[in-house]
Structure formats: C-alpha cells, structure tokens
C-alpha cells in the first residue's frame, strides 16, 4: 500500500469517476453525492499521508508498470507536489460540499467530470515527465471544458468558446516546445533534463533556450501572466459557483510547472541556461499585479472582482518564480496554499450572495436584504481580510513571507511596492463591495430564498473559510515545511535515486 | 529531405494561422486541425529524420528513435478528441448565440468576407447598369 502511495491521488479519482458513471449510481443523485464525497475524504487522507511520508523520508518515486525512469511513465511525490495535491483535495472537498446543495443537478455527469478534473490536476502535480505533464494538462483541460459549460446558458457558451479555442492553441505550442526540448536534451524526464542541462553541446543550447521560452509562454497562458490572461475574468465569472471555486487551483498548475521546469531545469548555475527568461518574467509578473489591481478596482460584480483577485495573486506568485531563490519559492508555496483556498472560499461566498439577492445577483447595486446577512457577511469579511492581507489571517503571513524573501534576495525595491499597493487596491475595492452588498438594501427578503438556501451551501463555504485560520495557527510548521519542499525541489533527485538504486 | 519536410510543416502552419485569425468558429477549428497536423509532423521530426530504419531493436544496425513516434501517437489521439470537442462546442455556440462569430456578435466583423462580397456584387451591379443603358 505504502509503495503505491504516489499513484493513489491519480488513481483514486479515476476509479471513483468510473464508479459513479455506472448506471446504478448515475441514476441516483444522492448516492452519487455520497460516493464522491467519501472518495474525496479518502483523497484528503491519502494526500495528507503522502505529505507526512515525504517530509519524513524524502521523495517517493513510482514507475508505472515498472518501466524505468527516463522512458516510462514516472510519478514523483516530493513535499512540493504533496503540498499541491493536499491543497487540491481540500479545495475540492469544500467546493463539492457546496455543489451537493443543488448545483450538480443542473446537468448530467457533474460528479464524474469533477473527479476527472481532480485526476488531471493531481497527475500534473505528481508527474516527473514533461510529456506526461502535457497529457495530464489535456485531461484536466477537457474535464474543465465540460465543467465550464455545465448547466448551459449563453454567457457560459461564449466564455467556453474562447477558453477552449485559446487553450487548444496553447496545447499546440506545448507540443512544439516538447519536440524542441526532446531534440535538445534527448530526454523529457524532468530530473534527467536537470542533470543534462549543464552539459549541453553548443549546438543544442539555442534549441534548449527556445524550448524553455516556449514552455514559459504555455505555462503563462495557464497561470494568467499579463498579455495572456484575458481569458480568465470572463471564464471564472460566468461558470457555476463550485466550478469557479475549483478553478482557483487551475492557475496554480501553470505556476507549479514553472517552478518545476524553470526553477529546476533552468536553475541558476546550469551554465548558459541558468535563469532563462526570469528578467522578462519579473517585468510581466509585476505588470500582471498592476493590471489585476486595476481590474479589482473596476469590477462591477463580486465574481468579476474575485476573478481579478485571482489574477492579482497569480501575479504575486509569479514574482516569486522571477526572484528564483529557494526562500522565495518557499514563500510562494505558503502563499499558494493561502490564495487558492481563500479564492475558492470567496467564490462560494459569492454564490451565497447570488442565491440570496434574487435579480440583483452579485452586481454592486442596491437590492433586497439577505436572509442570513450576519453569517454571509461574517464569511465575506474573513475571505476579504485574508485576501487583502490583513492580520490575523493567512494573507498577512503569506505577504510578510514573500516580502521577507524579496528583502533577502535584493528584489525588495520592486516587489514591496507592488505587494503593498495591490493590497491597498484590494482593500478599497472589497470595502466598497461589502458595504454595497450588505448595507445598501431596500424592500423585504425574497420569500423563495429560504427553500433555495441549504445548510450544505454554508458548510462548503465555511469549511474553506476555516482553512485560513488553520493556515495561521499552523504557520510555524507550514513555513518550515515549505522551506523543506523548496529545498528538496531545487536539490533535485538523480535518476539512480528514482529507480531505487538501479543505474 | 529535411528542407522539403520543413517547408511542408511551415506551409501548413502558415495556412493554419491564416485560418485561425478569421472570426468564424468553423474556420478556426479547421485552422486548429491543420495546426495539430503540422505539430505532429514537427514532433515526429524531433528524433531526427532517417530513411529505412525501423524503430525496432535487432532489425538493423542502428534503429531510429522510437520515442517521438510514441509521442506523436499520443498527440494524435489527444488532438482528435480536442478537435471533436471544439466542433461540438462550435455547433452549440451557433445554436446558443445565433451566429458563428467567436465573440457571438451578430454584425460580421470579418473584413475579408465583406471585401469578397463587394467584389462579387460589383460586376453584377455594373452589368445591371449597362443592361439598363442598352434598353
């Protein structure tokens, strides 16, 4: 069982998805919900166990079908990937609770698609092979295409069309990059590439550089880097609430791949390839933060605002890639945990707002009061304060960690103003949003809200909001572990280690 | 051989980029299909081009690299599924939004199409005018 641990986060959602596709389950929605929920709980347990094991014993390799490392499908669970898998499964659990309150009944196959999406995400986090990364990207993308239009509607179709066509072009670029890299390196196994990077011949150096920059473009599309981020606000604000919450982790896949490829294969000290494209990334990530802040200030509805907050946090995280130091990556890991969970929670809170305000939805206009303004407002305040970066919530710890690492790496002069001013912009926008949504009211509570609103809605949103408090309480060990994760990732693993001592 | 191969890939990418820059979903899907063919060919060439060398050990002295072929196979399958999805989505968007523009706006913004239309209508208009004169 322990031997197969790295494969479980990929296989569990896969089998669960196939399971709930059987007619027996597929015809009974409550049963489907229960089974999916149980599998998600198992997934959280497995990923927590994986994080514990990797922190204690170091990286775990898993060769699918025992095909050895540079050739076979190879999964690598180190603290870094375990952190991301745990993050995904906790977020998925919260968003799924919310979906069970009725959002999943608006179309068929919600639960299998949701599970396939998780399989793609976990696979992308765990794989140690660049081509496999592409395959898992496609799995998570095709599941996300279907989840995006789940429930249907004009706005969703339009958003999906842009998202799908754009990502298909991105996938084509990904394949071109992989072909170039294969020719340059002679391998697509990431640890193997990292080993060969310092010893490339002069002939293949330009190819390796071109391939690396192409990959940065592809990951930039996924991570919402400045000129490539235009798909994000419309996609996130038009899709259904639980899907938007789950999508909060999608931008982090691109970011994580940049850490893996550009932080390890193109690491400083790898001769000519060291630090490839990081100067450009620094400029673009800074501009992403600026554009995200402007978007946050200009947003007319709560979901648009949160989508722009996602861009803002993506820009902040990409700055940690551009800084490139181990401490910056560690700060990035903590900030990823915080921003993903809180953006997801905020989308669920936006869902609560939409449900209770009738026609006005989540637009910032005067409308009817809510049925449960205190509880909703309390959750809203937690999410808002965490995402702005006010103490005592996790955003504060995360931002301090990032600014500290910027000070140590000598990047403080451009990182500090951006982090602080974007926090100010978020504070202005969110205080305006909150006072409009909760205080500018007239008329009575809508009568049908009581039936529409269920405890599960609050359970999902509440669960994710609680994680910010957990992140603060465990901030000491978590920062230590994320340091470990970043160190382990930068140190890398050799092929021999991967194959368990076999040459 | 490399020159011909590279030219073919280049021409296909050029055509696909032209098609993808049109505003109609069908043209874009066609462009994406062409693009994926070109990318598959490019991926196939990444192991180096060789003639009469099977990708099997023991058949010849120096067999060709089998990995790119495996990669191409995977890429073909994925590309096929994605194109099918994009087509279905395009049909759905045609039904939901009432037209086949990517932005879902009804006014045609494709300048090439309007130019085409103008040119097609111009001779007809002159014909009509000349016909009127003769009468």
Image (spheres, coloured by chain):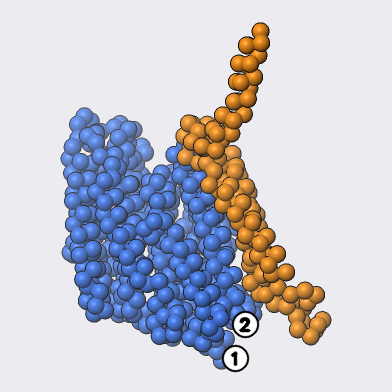
Say whether marks 2 and 1 touch (CB < 8 Å). yes
Q: Colour of chain A?
A: blue
> Foreground: A493 or A108?
A493
Q: Chain of mark 1?
A: A
Relative to residue A395, is residue A369 depicted above or below?
A: above
Q: Quadrant of residue A328?
A: bottom left
From the top left corner, tell me how far across and down residue A132 is, in percent.
Answer: 57, 69
> Foreground: A71 or A66?
A71
Q: Which residue is mark 1?
A: A502
Residue at x-position 49% and y-position 31%? B106
Determine if residue B120 is in view. Answer: yes
Which chain gets the orange colouring? Answer: B
From the top left corner, tell me how far across and down residue A317 is, in percent.
Answer: 33, 66
From the top left corner, tell me how far across and down residue A273 is, in percent.
Answer: 45, 79
* Quadrant location, the C terminus of chain A: bottom right
Q: Which residue is mark 2?
A: A68
Numbered circle sitting on residue B102: none
- Report whether mark 2 lies on the same chain as mark 1: yes
Q: Residue furthest front?
A: B134
Q: Earlier in the sequence, mark 2 or mark 1?
A: 2
Determine if residue A75 is in view. Answer: no
């Amino acid at each position: 069982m322990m031997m197969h641990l790295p494969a479980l986060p990929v296989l569990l959602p896969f089998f669960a998805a196939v399971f709930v596709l059987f007619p027996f389950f597929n015809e009974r929605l409550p049963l489907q919900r229960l089974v999916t929920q149980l599998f998600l709980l198992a997934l959280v347990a497995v990923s927590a166990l994986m994080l514990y094991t990797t922190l204690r014993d170091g990286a775990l390799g898993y060769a699918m079908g025992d095909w050895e490392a540079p050739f076979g499908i190879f999964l690598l669970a180190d603290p870094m990937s375990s952190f991301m898998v745990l993050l995904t499964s906790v977020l998925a659990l919260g968003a799924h609770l919310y979906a069970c309150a009725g959002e999943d009944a608006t179309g068929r196959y919600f639960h299998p698609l949701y599970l396939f999406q998780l399989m793609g995400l976990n696979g992308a986090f765990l794989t140690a092979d660049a081509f496999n990364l592409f395959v898992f990207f496609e799995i998570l993308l095709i599941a996300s295409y279907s989840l995006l239009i789940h429930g249907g509607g004009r706005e969703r179709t339009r958003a999906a069309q842009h998202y799908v066509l754009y990502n298909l072009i991105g996938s084509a670029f990904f394949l071109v990059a992989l072909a170039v890299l294969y020719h340059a390196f002679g391998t697509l196994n990431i640890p193997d590439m990292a080993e060969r990077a310092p010893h490339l011949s002069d002939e293949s150096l330009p190819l390796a550089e071109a391939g690396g920059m192409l990959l940065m473009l592809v990951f930039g599309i996924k991570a919402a880097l400045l000129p490539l981020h235009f798909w994000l606000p419309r996609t996130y604000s038009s899709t259904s609430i639980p899907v938007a919450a789950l999508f909060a982790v999608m931008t982090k896949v691109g970011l994580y791949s940049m850490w893996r490829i550009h932080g390890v294969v193109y690491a400083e000290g790898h001769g000519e390839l060291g630090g490839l494209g990081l100067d450009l990334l620094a400029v673009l990530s800074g501009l992403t933060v600026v554009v995200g802040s402007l978007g946050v200030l200009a947003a007319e509805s709560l979901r648009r605002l949160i989508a722009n907050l996602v861009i803002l946090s993506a820009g902040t995280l990409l700055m940690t890639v551009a800084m490139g130091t181990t401490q910056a990556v560690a700060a990035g890991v903590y900030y990823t945990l915080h921003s993903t969970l809180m953006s997801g929670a905020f989308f669920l809170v936006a869902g609560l707002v939409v449900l209770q305000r009738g026609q006005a939805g989540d637009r910032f206009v005067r409308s009817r009061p809510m049925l449960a303004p205190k509880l909703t407002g309390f959750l809203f305040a937690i999410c808002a304060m965490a995402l702005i970066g006010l103490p005592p919530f996790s955003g504060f710890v995360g931002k301090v960690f990032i600014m500290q690492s910027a000070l140590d790496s000598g990047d403080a002069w451009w990182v500090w103003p951006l982090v602080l001013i974007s926090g100010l912009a978020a504070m202005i926008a969110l205080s305006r949003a909150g006072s409009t949504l909760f205080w500018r009211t007239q008329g009575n509570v809508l009568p049908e809200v009581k039936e529409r609103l269920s405890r599960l809605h609050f359970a999902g949103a509440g669960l994710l909001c609680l994680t910010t408090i957990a992140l603060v309480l465990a901030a000491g060990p978590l920062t230590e572990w994320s340091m470990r994760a970043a160190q382990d990732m930068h140190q890398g693993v050799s092929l021999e280690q991967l194959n368990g001592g076999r040459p | 051989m490399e020159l011909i191969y590279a030219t073919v890939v280049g021409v296909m990418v050029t055509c696909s980029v032209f098609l993808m820059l049109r505003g109609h979903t069908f043209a874009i899907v066609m462009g994406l299909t062409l693009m994926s063919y070109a990318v598959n060919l490019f991926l196939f060439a990444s192991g180096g081009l060789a003639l009469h060398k099977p990708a099997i050990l023991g058949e010849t002295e120096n067999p060709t690299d089998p990995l790119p072929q495996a990669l191409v196979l995977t890429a073909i399958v994925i590309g096929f599924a994605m194109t099918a999805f994009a087509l279905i989505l395009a049909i759905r968007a045609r039904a939901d939004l009432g037209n086949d523009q990517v932005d879902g706006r009804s006014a045609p913004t494709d300048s090439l199409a309007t130019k085409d239309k103008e040119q097609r209508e111009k001779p007809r208009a002159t014909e009509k005018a000349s016909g009127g004169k003769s009468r």
